[in-house]
Amino acid sequence: MPNNSAGLIAKAFAVYVKDLRLELRTRNALNAVLMFGITTLTVVSFSLGQSSLSPKLLSALFWVIIFFSAMSGLAQTFIREEETGTSLALKLTADPDSIYIGKLFFNITLLSTLTIIITPLFFIFTDAPTDNVGRFIVILVLGVLGLCVATNIVAAIIAKASVKGTLFAVLSFPVLITLLIVLVGASEKIFDGQSFSTIMSEIKFLIAYIVIMLTMSILLFKFVWEE
Amino acid sequence: MWWKLLLFIALSLVIIFSFITPAPQRQIGEASRVFYYHIPQAWVCVIAFAMSMIYSIRYLKNKKIVEDDRAVIAAKLGFIFCVLAAITGSIFAKVTWGSFWNWDPRETSIFILLLIYGAYFALRGAVEVEEKRASLSAVYSIFAFVTVPFLIFVIPRILPSLHPADSIVDKNLKFTMGFSVRIIFFSSLTLFTVLYLWIFNIARRVQKITRFYEEQED
């Protein structure tokens, strides 16, 4: 058990690299998330046709796509450990904190990859206004962090349950709904072309949410992992 | 025994007086009588969920299955009172705002509370091993409960609300109610709390007996 923070970070990094290497070999989480995202986006843009959308609708559709794509893949990293029976070996080699941080960074990487691919496609397909992209990226980064921080421990919980797939969305949604409401509100203001100062309260909320969820997750994770 | 009888008489009196006294709020009129029931229900719901969370924390600390039993009982009762508060609130909304449900911030937050505990019961149904079920659901209920303050305090400030905010205290923390209204309201609040604690105690003892017989059979 590493007592110093350097040991913790080194171990977390090792877990992260292990998961990343595994993912690059099989690509099952990335493929699932990416194809899900692209499919949803295509459905949305086909069904809307050429009609121009209001800022409210644009931001709601965008976060619905991101939310459901995230739900399809973010639990993979924990489910894989349980299905292949490697969680015991992982328990022996690393402490819960470093596993939590390693897995969290893996999920952040996964969801960032998704948003980097989906967001430009979304702007192309729906003809959303691109004049405030900088502000949108700020919200996007905070949104990705918030989604990953809040769902990581839920993923660890459902990996131990018997019906994994559906339970992940069911358990995550109540935790994420506040985040999603704020994200949709902030994106709507950005698409509407409002200035940066109008979304300051949303940014503060997002930062507070991320910090609190991260603290709670780290406090509680060992009870899930050591079960 | 005597206090149960007293509770029965007192609750009956509250029900009678809540209908024969003048309506607590002049502008809203007769519909405002719901306030004697709706707020105590919401209050009990919060107490029950808070108790459920405290028992969950205690379970994670000492890993005694009794604590988990109590957490579940409190969560179930809280869920029932939450449904009651949602129903009474929605009837009131129909009368005063014209629709049963319009995603007012308070309605949103009570809906999410129902979702959280719905998910909590779903999770409990999906894990077979008792100890595993207890700690996984304890972690989830603590984690999800942390988001509730966000809902109650942050969302109403971001979205506009129609929910009456000054029905108990005004902005200067002065009571806005008249004397008789105050008496009925606070008796109702206390009696609902006692009623909840009584039901909780019965359910807890039933669970204890069930456990005892299960052990006898093994």
Image (tube, coloured by chain):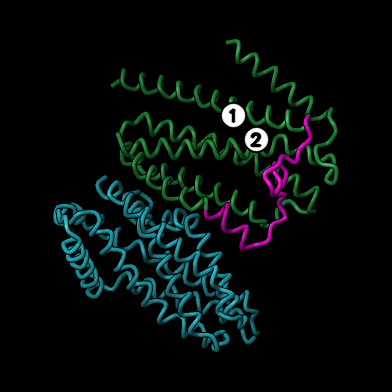
Chain colours: A cyan, B green
Q: Position of residue B207 (x, y in %)?
A: 43, 24
Instruction: Assign the magenta stretch its main secondary structure.
Output: loop
The earlier-in-sequence mark between 1 and 2 is: 2
Q: Is residue A210 left or right of residue B111?
A: left
Dot 1, crowdedness within 10 Å: few (<14), some or many (≥20)? some
Q: Residue at x 65, y 44 (%)?
A: B86
Amino acid carrying label 2: it is Pro
Q: Cβ–Cβ below 8 Å for labels 1 and 2?
A: yes
Q: Residue at x 52, y 65 (%)?
A: A180
Q: Label 2 marks which chain's residue?
A: B
Residues marked 1 and 2, same chain:
yes
- Residue B178 in magenta? yes
Read off the magenta span.
Answer: B150-179
| Pointer 2 residue | B40
Q: Is residue B137 above or below residue A187?
A: above
Instruction: Quarter of the image for the C terminus of chain B: give it.
Output: top left
Q: Position of residue B40 (x, y in %)?
A: 65, 35
Extreme residue toward the top, this view? B2
- Residue A21 in magenta? no
Q: Residue at x 73, y 51 (%)?
A: B100
Q: In whole angstroms, how far apart are the C-alphas of marks 1 and 2?
A: 8 Å
Q: Secondary structure at mark 2?
A: helix
Say which of B131 and A39 sits in front.
B131
Q: Is residue B42 above or below residue A33?
A: above
Number of marks in the rendered image: 2
- The circle drawn on residue A209 is none
| Pointer 1 residue | B193
Amino acid carrying label 1: it is Thr
Q: Residue at x 36, y 65 (%)?
A: A74
Q: Secondary structure at mark 1?
A: helix
